[in-house]
Each structure stands twice: as structure tokens, then as C-alpha cells.
């Protein structure tokens, strides 16, 4: 019978906590030896022996967890999800092998875990070898940091290959600034907003071009256009580069405007009476008049300074 004991180990507390978790699946247990023995499929005197030795009966506990479809790690520590019944038969076997290898020092299970890990290890080695070929920067401490970041990105299940390669280009060519893109749609129709604060992608722009335009990269973001009201200038799903440091509105330029909970992308015209007209380049849409009285609810997010288009 495999057991565990450590320097700072309180058997009574640990065993009682495990029994409390077992009670969630076997409510008839009241921590009496007979009930414990019945649940863990051991003789009536065995729990008393465990107490005298002050050691947890890992093998019996793990067998109980497997029988009940319980997460072994959760049953022993209280951490993670309770159940593993959602796993396939193959995944459950792999999971149990991991538990036997970690908690019971089962050599056969450990060998099976290592055998399953081989394809991943090969994949990781190939990723690192590819990175070492593609990264052209000096191999110093900074190189190791960049290599680690790119490795983590490459091994994510939802890794965007285009974004991944743009990161490599960025690190190899510091002449590029990486501008964050957000999963926010600005309406070129009747208004849409998706509040998501974390960047979901990055686009590379040359520092030389940013300097020529007078932009600081920290004042730029990329968003998506939604709708057709700005056709043919802006089409649905076009990427828009927005300059957010707005000091004045230039007549005839295109801006992203927030009014209440709506984001719009429109061409702005200043009127002689101080009001603003929001114009759609698509003539099928009527202009929108914003009076001075409505300016309090108006927020100019930024000016559209670059549009990415698919052609053909």
C-alpha cells in the first residue's frame, strides 16, 4: 500500500479534508472506520492502521477516485475540477497514468507518460530549431528572452501564424513598430461596439513612415470597420489605423466617434453655426446632424489615418 508523509504533514487534518471531499460522492460516510473501509474497499481495521502510522493511503484513495470518475488531484488536494467524466476513455487513461506516475511512483505509468510526451517534445524541438534559423538578432540574454516569448506563442493551440511571423519580423527588424489591434468594430452603418480591452493582434508599421506622418506609436490603434455606409472609401471588415491624440477636428477628415454606447466612423464637416455634420461616403445613407447641445455625449476617439483593403 503506497502512502505519503512529509515533514510538515498533519495526517488528521489532511485525512479529514480528503474524507470531506469523499463525502460529496459517498454521503453515507460519517468518518467512522467501517464506513471509510467500505468506501475505500479495504478491511475494517485498515483505517485504524493508517491513523497509527500517520500516512495517507494513496493507492486506496486513487482507486476510489478512478471508480467514481473523480479528479485524483482534486480529491487529494482540493485543487482543480472535481470530475473527469467529461474526458474520453483514452484521455482518462492518460490522466490516470499521470496520477500514478506522480503520486505512486509507478514506473510503468511513468514510461507510458514519457512515451506519449515524445511527439510533443519533437514538436517543441522543431519549433526551437525553426526559431533559431529565423531569428537573426545577436544571441545574447535578450535573444533568450525573445526566443522564449516566441516559443510560447508558437506552441499555443490557437496560434495565429501571420501574427507569429510578424513578431519574428519585428524582432529581426527594429525599424518596425507593432501597433495593437483590438477586436472592436466601428460602424460604417448604424453603430456597433464590442468592449474588449486586450489587443487581439498586432500590425507592423515602419518607424520612418510614422515619423513622416507625425505619429507616435503609443497614440495609434487598429480596429475593424463594420457596415457599408462609408463605401467605397471603407468596406466591411477593413482594418483601420486610428490616431487617438486629437487636438482639433479637420474639416472633411474621417473620424471614429463615440456617442453614448455607439461607435461610428464618419466623415466630419464643420458647419458655420458650430454644429457638426457626420457624412457617409455611401450616398444611400443620409447625413447625421450633431448640434452643439449634443456635444456633451460626443467623444472623438480618433482620426482614421490608414485603411487596409483586400483587392480582388
Image (tube, rainbow, N blue to C red):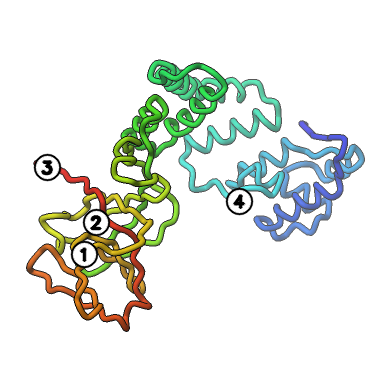
The structure residue drawn at horizontal position 33% and vertical position 37%, both measured from the top left corner, is 204
Mark 2 touching mark 3, by CB under 8 A? no
Instruction: Give the mark nearer the N terminus: 4 vs 2.
Output: 4
Residue 11 location, quadrant: top right
Instruction: Give the mark nearer the N terminus: 4 vs 3.
Output: 4
Residue 9 location, quadrant: top right
Mark linked to residue 251: 1
Query: What residue is shown with label 2?
Result: 225
Nearest to the observer: residue 252 or residue 282: 252
The structure residue drawn at horizontal position 76% and vertical position 41%, both measured from the top left corner, is 42
Mark 3–mark 1 Cα distance, whole angstroms, equals 29 Å
* Residue 31 at x, y percent in the picture: 81, 55
Relative to 97, 296 lies left or right: left
Q: Residue furthest right?
A: 52
Mark linked to residue 173: none
Query: What residue is shown with label 3?
Result: 311
* Residue 167 at x, y percent in the picture: 39, 32
Amino acid at each position: 500500500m503506497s502512502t505519503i508523509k512529509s515533514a510538515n504533514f498533519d495526517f488528521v487534518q489532511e485525512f479529514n479534508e480528503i474524507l470531506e471531499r469523499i463525502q460529496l460522492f459517498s454521503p453515507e460516510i460519517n468518518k467512522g472506520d467501517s464506513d471509510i473501509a467500505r468506501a475505500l474497499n479495504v478491511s475494517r481495521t485498515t483505517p485504524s492502521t493508517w491513523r497509527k502510522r500517520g500516512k495517507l493511503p494513496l493507492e486506496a484513495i486513487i482507486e476510489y477516485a478512478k471508480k467514481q470518475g473523480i479528479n485524483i488531484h482534486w480529491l487529494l488536494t482540493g485543487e482543480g475540477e472535481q470530475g473527469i467524466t467529461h474526458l474520453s476513455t483514452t484521455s482518462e487513461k492518460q490522466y490516470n497514468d499521470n496520477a500514478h506516475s506522480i503520486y505512486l511512483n509507478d514506473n510503468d505509468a511513468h514510461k507510458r507518460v514519457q512515451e506519449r510526451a515524445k511527439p510533443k517534445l519533437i514538436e517543441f524541438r522543431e519549433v526551437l530549431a525553426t526559431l533559431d534559423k529565423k531569428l537573426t538578432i545577436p544571441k545574447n540574454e535578450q535573444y533568450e528572452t525573445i526566443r522564449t516569448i516566441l516559443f510560447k506563442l508558437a506552441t499555443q493551440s490557437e496560434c495565429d501564424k501571420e501574427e507569429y511571423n510578424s513578431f519574428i519580423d519585428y524582432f529581426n527588424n527594429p525599424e518596425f513598430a507593432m501597433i495593437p489591434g483590438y477586436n472592436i468594430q466601428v460602424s460604417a452603418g448604424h453603430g456597433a461596439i464590442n468592449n474588449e480591452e486586450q489587443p487581439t493582434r498586432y500590425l507592423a508599421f515602419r518607424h520612418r513612415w510614422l515619423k513622416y506622418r507625425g505619429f507616435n506609436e503609443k497614440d495609434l490603434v487598429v480596429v475593424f470597420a463594420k457596415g457599408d455606409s462609408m463605401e467605397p472609401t471603407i468596406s466591411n471588415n477593413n482594418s483601420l489605423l486610428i490616431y487617438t491624440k486629437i487636438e482639433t477636428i479637420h474639416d472633411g477628415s474621417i473620424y471614429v466617434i463615440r456617442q453614448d454606447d455607439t461607435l461610428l466612423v464618419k466623415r466630419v464637416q464643420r458647419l458655420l453655426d458650430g454644429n457638426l455634420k457626420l457624412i457617409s461616403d455611401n450616398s444611400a445613407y443620409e447625413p447625421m446632424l450633431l448640434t452643439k447641445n449634443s456635444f456633451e455625449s460626443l467623444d472623438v476617439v480618433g482620426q482614421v489615418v490608414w485603411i487596409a483593403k483586400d483587392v480582388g
